[in-house]
Amino acid sequence: MGKLFPIILAVIGIGGGVGAGLALRPEATAEQTKLSADPCGDVQNQKPDGAAQEAPDPATLEYVKLNNQFVVPVVQENRVNALVVISLSVEVEQGYKEEIYSREPKLRDAFLQVFFDHANAGGFRGAFTNSNNMDVLRKALRETAKDTVGSLVTDVLIMEIARQDV
């Protein structure tokens, strides 16, 4: 019985660990479900959640590169530890390029607020370019652009991003 007791404890421990892992695992997103449901792994025509049902025709879109880069300080313990430099382009329906340029000051102000909020939440620390951080930032930029300029904005593209530690 003395030799059997540690083996029983190990089996119970492993079973409990597996059960806890299954119970606490994150739910699969619709995107992950689509990927696992497709035996060929073909993801060319799949869209992540929140994407428009009908993708805009690329022939009807144009890209507006914002004139200047954004410089965002990363503050930690009341001192600037790094600077993040970002270049953006805005995807709009064709013919609205001048509309974006005319409203660029308001758009830049709104984007800066998004960047400052992202920096204050720790989004530019550590592995700041990992896909989760970038997805959060892209979504916030896209929503802000739509709130600021309207539905003629279809997306915001991060063209360049670099962090310089001070």
Image: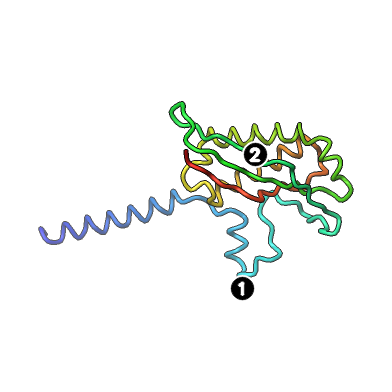
Tell me the residue at 12%/61% (across/down).
Answer: 3
- In the visual, does 90 lie left or right of 12? right
Q: How many marks?
A: 2
Image coords of residue 134 (percent x, y): 59, 48
Q: Local crowd at mark 1 within 10 Å, few (<14), some, or many (≥20)?
A: few
Residue lying at the far bottom in this picture: please name it.
40
User: Which label was assigned to residue 40?
Assistant: 1
Which residue type carries mark 1? Cys
- The N terminus is located in which quarter? bottom left
Q: Position of residue 12 (x, y in %)?
A: 27, 55
Q: Nearer the viewer, residue 36 or 58?
A: 58
Residue positioned 59% across, 33% down in the render: 116
Instruction: Please name whichever residue, 100 or 28, is drawn nearer the observer in this view of the structure.
Output: 100
Element class at badge 1: loop
Residue lying at the far left in this picture: please name it.
2
First in residue order: circle 2 vs circle 1: 1
Amino acid type, callout 2: Phe
Question: Is residue 51 positioned above or below 66 on the image?
Answer: below
Secondary element type, mark 2: strand
Contact between marks 2 and 1 (CB within 8 A): the answer is: no
Q: Residue at x 23, y 57 (%)?
A: 10
